[in-house]
Image (cartoon, rainbow, N blue to C red):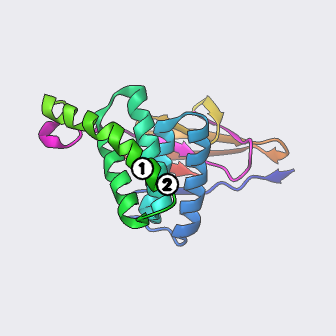
Amino acid sequence: MRQALVLVCLLAPAVALADDKSDAETLFRSGERAFTAAHYADAADAFEQAYAKLPLPAIAFSLAQAHRLQYFVDNQPQHLDRAVQLYHAYIDKQKTGGRVADAVANLAQIEPLLRELQASGAMKGGAPVVAKRTRLMVTSDVEGARATIDGDGGPTPLVREVTPGEHTVVVEADGYASYTVKTSAIADAALRLK
């Protein structure tokens, strides 16, 4: 059996990866899988990281979509705020064609909601209130891979909030040897395992 490749990298602003484009593509694919599974918060996390590495209009649009849909799941105003920013960024860069008409239509739906939230005081100073979270994200290039973090698992991409400190991650896929790694989560940061 072949052993699945697993790499560990800290997703923090101070850490630069050698191949941002490749990493952005992997993150985007993980976001697509999460989006398709209706895990919009996980998709937004993956797309956000991909966009930070490769700020393409198509990634901005996908990220806006994930934030817009997550707002309708949890009613957290920061999702609307971020979606509005990203739809405008997409339109500014794309200008015409692509998904511009969709971005404009979505803005027509969510900008009034955002204005209502800002007027009601649900957002301090017009800025979203974002709670910091410590998370682990496990991705895999192998289709159908499954992962667990401290025994809690599911299909990849798998994102879980965790406590700061050491955690055990296991990645398995049919036809591959399982892979176990211990990793340390840092408070208020996201750690991605690939």
Determine whether, in the image, residue 185 is placed left or right of residue 84: right
Q: Quadrant of residue 157?
A: top right
**Quick check: marks 2 and 1 in contact, CB under 8 Å?**
yes
Is residue 126 visible in the rendered image? The answer is: yes
Q: Which amino acid type is marked by label 1?
A: Ala
Residue nearest the observer in this picture, 150 or 140: 140
Determine whether, in the image, residue 117 is placed left or right of residue 70: left
Q: Quadrant of residue 77?
A: top left
At x 61% / y 52%, what residue is drawn?
29
Q: Position of residue 42 (x, y in %)?
A: 50, 40
- Residue on which disc 1 sits: 103
Identify whether 88 is placed above or below 157: below
Determine whether, in the image, residue 82 is placed left or right of residue 25: left
Magenta stretch bounds:
123-149
At x 45% / y 52%, what residue is drawn?
101
Q: Position of residue 36 (x, y in %)?
A: 61, 39
Q: Residue 152 in magenta?
A: no
Q: Position of residue 167 (x, y in %)?
A: 52, 39
Q: Which amino acid type is marked by label 2?
A: Arg
Crowding near the residue tagged with mark 1, few <14, some 14–19, many ≥20 C-alpha atoms within 10 Å: many
Identify whether 188 is placed above or below 149: below
Q: Residue 145 in magenta?
A: yes
Residue nearest the observer in this picture, 23 or 186: 23
- Residue on which disc 2 sits: 99
Of helix, strand and loop, which one carries label 2? loop
At x 53% / y 34%, what residue is drawn?
39
Identify whether 50 is placed above or below 146: below
Q: Position of residue 93 (x, y in %)?
A: 39, 66
Of helix, strand and loop, which one carries label 1? helix
Crowding near the residue tagged with mark 2, few <14, some 14–19, many ≥20 C-alpha atoms within 10 Å: some
Residue nearest the observer in this picture, 151 or 174: 174
